Amino acid sequence: MSTSSSLNGKRIVLGVGGGIAAYKSIELLRRLVDSGAFVSPVLTQSSLKFVGETTFSALGSEPARTSLWDSGDPIPHTRLGQQADVIVVSPATADLIARYAAGIADDLLTTTLVATSAPVVMVAAMHTEMWQHPSVEDNIATLRRRGVIVIEPETGRLAGGDIGVGRLATIERVVATIEGLFIKSNKSGSLSGKKVLVTAGGTREAIDPVRYIGNRSSGKQGIAFAEQAANFGAEVTLVSTVPAAAGRGVEVIEVESAQEMFDAVSALAGETDLVVMAAAVADFRSKIISPTKIKKNNGAPQIVLEPTPDILAYLGSVKPKNQVLVGFAAETGDPEAEARRKLKAKNADFVVANNVLEHDAGFAVDTNRVTLVFGDSQVTLALADKRDIASKVLSFVAEWAFKNGVWSE
Ligand code: CTP
């Protein structure tokens, strides 16, 4: 994106825990420094079994610290804690999470955590059994209640060849979450206190009890929007045609047809600060739904179609002045021109355009390449993970909404 990172000039303490994912914090350190942040690495003793101090000193903005006692400064933890704009712990092991939840302060990282009022981001990574242990779950709940941002691990290959949940989140996701904290000077998160409504998935329009008219939307991009909006502190309702996990800050309403989606969305929209219409809503449905299965021996059926309600256009027609409306344009032709047409026709504030014929963008793949069309401008984002696209679009939209007075502080 052409805008510079919101991390430029920010002071970040990067705490590294003792887990195999410690090696990934080297890349995280690089990315944070590249974003213009001043990064102070703090390594726990057990992290040194996995990674070397020299690497972090070479890449950090100042030499890495490994102990409360090894610098000339008698109180490094209070200085680090007081000066930090954010403290990021990656990987946050079960042990670090437990000690932080209990308020234990017996090394440089835990003392710094207890001595700060800056936002704290814990990037959890551990074995599946540990992540699912009730003590870890309780500790995570305690930290979240205190406002700590916990980035949950993803599913994938773990140390020792196991496969399961526990793998450190992608660096893109971690950086996007940290960037989200600084989109405006509000330390508690860019969408903190905002109500966000997201739709996801393709609608299914019944023909008879077994058949429907559908489309290829996987719902991945919409679900990524809901998750990232929650990471940015929003209260999110996800209206989805595909099953999605409710989680911290995300309530899920499952629907099937365009009409059901319209009913759910229109009931909530008046109270919403941001609507993201990522769903692929069918434009037409069968005028008559057969109550019984249509049989072959009666010959080819005549299916007469009628239009479905256009949800985005309806929302545009009743949009309150403090609401931001984001639509999508999944196209096979000229995405930007079509997006601009839909922006005007449906009175949206933004339309996210993409070409679904590209092999690495659009339906069912994990990556996307989009152009954000708004007013008379447009911004093209590079190919990225759908979560990363969601973060970037949300950051951009939030910044625009504050700058243009649609949202107040
Ligand atoms: N949309 C909607 N309700 C519909 C159809 C579309 O809310 N019945 C929304 C989609 O969620 C998306 C935007 O409108 O955010 C554009 O959808 P798209 O299918 O690309 O546009 P259409 O209006 O159907 O236009 P066209 O068929 O000309 O592409």
Image (tube, rainbow, N blue to C red):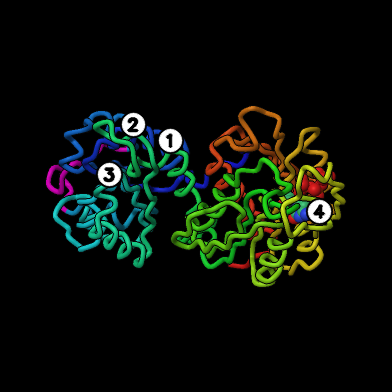
- Do residues under tags 1 and 4 come within 8 Å of each other at their CB atoms? no
Mark 2, ligand 1, within 8 Å: the answer is no
Q: Residue type at mark 3?
A: Met
Circle nearer the N terminus (4, 2): 2
Instruction: Find disc 1 in the rendering and name its residue.
Output: 31
Q: Which residues are magenta?
A: 62-74
Dot label at residue 126: 3
Q: CA distance from mark 1 to mark 4?
A: 51 Å
Q: CA distance from mark 4 to mark 2?
A: 61 Å
| Residue 384 spot, x, y in % from top left | 56, 35
Q: Residue type at mark 2?
A: Leu
Q: CA distance from mark 2 to mark 1?
A: 10 Å
Q: Residue type at mark 4?
A: Ser
Question: Could you tell me which residue is drawn at 82 percent across and 46 percent down?
Answer: 298
Foreground label between 1 and 4? 4
Question: Could you tell me which residue is drawn at 34 percent across and 51 percent down?
Answer: 122
User: In this view of the protein, which residue sits in the foreground, 130 or 83?
Assistant: 130
- Do residues under tags 4 and 3 come within 8 Å of each other at their CB atoms? no
Circle nearer the N terminus (3, 1): 1
Dot label at residue 14: none
Instruction: Find disc 4 in the rendering and name its residue.
Output: 286
User: In this view of the protein, which residue sits in the foreground, 381 or 387?
Assistant: 387
